[in-house]
Amino acid sequence: MAILSNPTFERTVSRLGLRRIEEALLCAPARHQDFRRVAQRFAEVAGVERAVPMLVRVVERDEEDGREPILGYSSGSKVPLSSPFGQATARLDISVADAAGMRATMGIFGSIWGWKDTKVGDSLLIMARPVRFGSKLCLDNVEQLDTRYVGKVMPVYLGIQGRVAGSAVNSLVGHALDQDVDLALSAAVAAICEACGLSEEQILEACEAPAQFVDLEDLLAGLHAPTTPEEGSAALVVSKRIACLAIQAAALRQNARVEHPDAAIGAGGSGKLVDRAAGLLRSQPEEPTGDQERAAAGIAAALQSRTPMKGLLCGDVGTGKTLAYLAPAVAACQLGARVAILAPTSLLADQIANAIVRRFGDKVAVQRVEAGGKIVDPQAILVGTAGLTTVAAKAKYIPNFLIADEQHKLDTTTRERMVGPWTHVLDVSATPIPRTMALSLFPGVQVFTIEEQPVQKSIQTLLIDVGQRKRTVSAIQTAIASGKRAAILLPRVGTETAPGKDGDVDANRSSVLKAAEQFEKAFPGKVATLYGDMSDDDKRDAIEGVRSGRTPIVIGSTVFETGIDIPDVAVMVIRDADHFGTSQLHQMRGRLARAGGLGECFLMVDDLTSLSAETRKRLDVMTRISNGFELAAHDLINRGAGELEGTAQSGATSSVFKLIPIRPRDLLDNRIDLPGTLERAEEREGSTNRRHSQDRLFN
């Protein structure tokens, strides 16, 4: 049995994220309006200065044709406004009368489409403000409502801006209720129980539903047809808790890892892997920070568990995340585990492989696996880009420990291709994607944080426009004269800026190569280029030239963003900074002062005054917040967490109830501690670290 549908309803169902029309009651209203008492005589609202509900009747206005009302004419013409394809004006006048026969004129402004079928004799439920002009009564700010709610409490559906109108949601819900209310209720209840993974009784108890809602059907009735506004408000509160519970359930399902006999690495001796990782870390020339030691020990301890780790190593750019995960990775490899490291670019993969050879080459084997290549030694630490997943699949290679470095640059499915039931997974990022941040709020994800910087550095971020370009040129000249490096970065090849003949930064866009030509005139022999279309060998040569100081100025595209370690970059100019997200900007800024000291980052736009309020706010955040974790939290709050069980890594978080806005703070405030589930997970993973992260996120 099914509720009859049509193409219009099908589009609405799809855009709302419902599976079928029978689930229409999962569309929650934003609020409820009380129409239990509706004015039926204008005398009842005399002197009222706000919009009030009224019941009126359309009356005849056309003396020549008593069959239809004249809804108005466009200025200077006789084209009826009821014709939407004519020269319709944005104003519409309709004459109405109350129950006593008193007349008034309704002034409709803006869109008149919803009034085109209004006929003489129609009864209308409206919200309007009564205004008198001498003896004439007018009704302003008119909103047409559904007459079936006269004497009732009406749910108000807002829809999704740009996708689904509130009126379309109202029609969908009304259609489902009119067609088969029992089927609509049972379908919604089934979807709620499925999403939460609990029975009706468990859901209502966990969400502290008032006694008036004896079951979920009762709750849905209170949501869509409450007898009082108070009942509707109570139903909305419980529905939001259920939506948060469903998101929590989705996160737990996504985070869940099942014990596996082959998961534990180095379990032969208690602490064996932890001690080995600590020794490798302390064997390095630089003294590790306390945070690095704690992160490395935590990762090593997790690798010894029979429950595969789902971990997040979050540390700001330059805090030494690579060494913190390499120490336990090398220790695991020495104990016979298969270890693989994924990186988003060849440059970063090269850098990681070289770091392993340089630091641990006498203790472990490493293979840099190119796309289309072969795995020569499965027991070596394998390092590659997304192409490694294809190579691994062909070789039937599944690692015991998989590390995804710069995780925010890898899509959700890339990493999953190499994950087996026994594989420990560690995501590494200074600015985790919103979806990962949201999942880390719940048990199942072990969060390791690094805050201490191994070197002392201070980065100043300035937001400027091209009118202040001389500041950037002066800073570049000073940096080069003192033996430092400078980077000029642009959104993409073909949107570069170049210095003019006098050395200023020109606001005109040009290619990276043309920009480099112009800089070459001012700094002969000191300019390198770096962009995505270059061969890997040319990229390596360019980076080495900048690193050695042979070409201390690099003109580059966003390829400079990910993992490139060049000491002594003292000045960075990011052109068209409004084209980037906060994570990208922070990653590029992280290339500054890698060896310590002072750094200047200029975020340059064409014109500060022309930026939208949203863009200006996003860029201002960059000048105030220098910590990547805090920027990632800001990103989560503003962009949304995405689909916790899907592939979208940011945007609206879908839950079982549609149209209920869920913020990260809501997820924490409405977190349900289900017996035997969350408590054990919290014990296993260490709740202190997670709660510390949450405090930083929202307090």
Image (tube, helix red, strand yellow):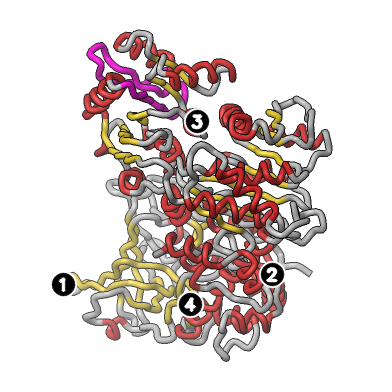
Within 10 Å of the Cα at label 4, are there few (<14), some (14-19), or many (20+) other Cα atoms?
many
Label 4: state its secondary structure: strand
Residue labelled with disc 3: 564
If the image is split into quadrants, where does the C terminus sit? bottom left
Give, as a three-letter code, the residue at label 1. Gly
Label 1: state its secondary structure: loop
- Which of the two discs, 4 and 3, sits closer to the camera? 3
Q: Residue furthest left?
A: 134
Residue labelled with disc 1: 134
- Residue 485 painted magenta: yes
Looking at the rendering, the stretch of residues picked out in magenta corresponds to: 483-511
Q: Which mark is residue 191?
A: 2
Give, as a three-letter code, the residue at label 2. Ala
Within 10 Å of the Cα at label 2, are there few (<14), some (14-19), or many (20+) other Cα atoms?
some
CA–CA distance between discs 2 and 3?
Answer: 47 Å
CA–CA distance between discs 1 and 2?
Answer: 57 Å
Left or right for 5, reference 16: right
The reply to whether the C-beta atoms of the residues labelled 2 and 3 are less than 8 Å apart is: no
CA–CA distance between discs 1 and 4?
Answer: 34 Å
Residue labelled with disc 4: 154
CA–CA distance between discs 2 and 4?
Answer: 24 Å
- Which of the two discs, 2 and 4, sits closer to the camera? 2
Nearest the viewer among 80 and 679 is 679
Label 3: state its secondary structure: loop
CA–CA distance between discs 3 and 1?
Answer: 76 Å
Give, as a three-letter code, the residue at label 3. Ile
